[in-house]
Amino acid sequence: MKKKILVTGGAGYIGSHTVIALCEAGFEPIIADNYSNSEPWILDQLTKITKKKIKNYTVDCTDKDGLKKVFKEEQIYGVIHFAAYKAVGESVENPLKYYQNNIGSLNCVIELMNEYGVENLVFSSSCTVYGEADYLPVDEKHPIKKAESPYGYSKQVCETLISDCLNSNQLTRAITLRYFNPVGAHTSGLIGELPIGTPNNLVPFITQTAAGIRKYLTVFGNDYKTDDGTCIRDYIHVMDLANAHVKALNTMSETGKSITLNVGTGKGSSVLEAVQSFEKVNQLKLNYRIGPKRSGDIEQIYAATELAEKTLKWRTEYSIDDAMKDAWRWEKNLANK
Ligand code: UFG
């Protein structure tokens, strides 16, 4: 029998790509989503890609009784917990929303795992826990810095919550993945990122500008101490990130190990390099302007990837060029939705 994996936030950006990776690896994903930042039609797209109907529950993961139904009805082997809010700016304006949802949902998930004897957790964290890094590439031993936003702090609290529960045996094992910058879309063009309103993140802003939805991209600052003056990030293709989750489940069952890992490519790209990559692979000119720095942006960050590669027996397979091609295919398909 296939192992059932509960994917909270499974209709969301990273969640939906992970559902595909799970199916390909022979797991049975079960989605729990409240569609607060995703769309139910993504489920139909998943069916088109996987040729399977993915079992799904409409439920808010802070609703313990609602979520309990899933644990009761399904023999769950592991949980991948994506469900969380992720807009940094919004978290500054409405911190209660972020603490309540991001910490509350993890709390509920672990309580239910404990109650139903579910042993394996994969948790979505973020490189935001490192803040402005003291050295690069940043590795997992780097100190955790004071969070720049309630969103960032919610991820730090969740990481601590997990390690406390592991220490007290309220949780059996967990792999925490610190994501760098997820970009791109599934190569089918059927699923991808669905930003609500004006995108905050670079790649959806680029694709919306190319599609004519936005007039121009503002590059936030070009006088940083980097080669071309723009900020550097580690852009990882969402399918590579999705595969890391599958490998994390396999690692836990093979080794029984709990660990926290960076999930990035190890390669930093500047904002202008990202723009150039988009222009090159899609043979387009992007309308962009240099604007002021965005408050709270860190100058540069990219991942040390050795520990993840060794532990998960995983490597990235896609480049930023692949991601830009896939993101544009998705944006064009979205225009016809
Ligand atoms: N950028 C622009 N113009 C835009 C949007 C972004 O120049 O319109 C630049 C940013 O200044 C930054 C880079 O593109 O240098 C990437 O910005 P994103 O907003 O896409 O990503 P961030 O690195 O700021 O944010 C990511 C995650 C967050 C996480 C944060 C931690 O999306 O969830 O890293 O640093 F909190």
Image (cartoon, helix red, strand yellow):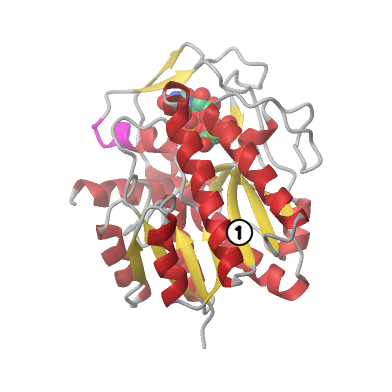
For the point 56% across and 71% down, which residue is it?
116
Whether residue 218 is visible, yes or no, is: yes
For the point 30% across and 46% down, which residue is it?
331
Q: Residues within 10 Å of mark 1 (few under 14, many from 20)?
A: many
Q: Which residues are magenta?
A: 208-213
Q: Is residue 122 left or right of residue 211?
A: right
Q: Quadrant of residue 167?
A: bottom right
Q: Quadrant of residue 171?
A: bottom right
Decide which of 14, 273 is in the foreground and name it.
14
For the point 74% across and 75% down, which residue is it?
254
Q: Position of residue 10 (x, y in %)?
A: 42, 59
Q: Residue furthest right?
A: 141
Q: Is residue 71 left or right of residue 194?
A: right
For the point 46% across and 21% down, which residue is it?
219
Q: Position of residue 162 (x, y in %)?
A: 67, 50
Question: Secondary structure under badge 1?
Answer: strand
Q: Position of residue 151 (x, y in %)?
A: 53, 32
Q: Position of residue 335 (x, y in %)?
A: 21, 46
Tag 1 residue: 122
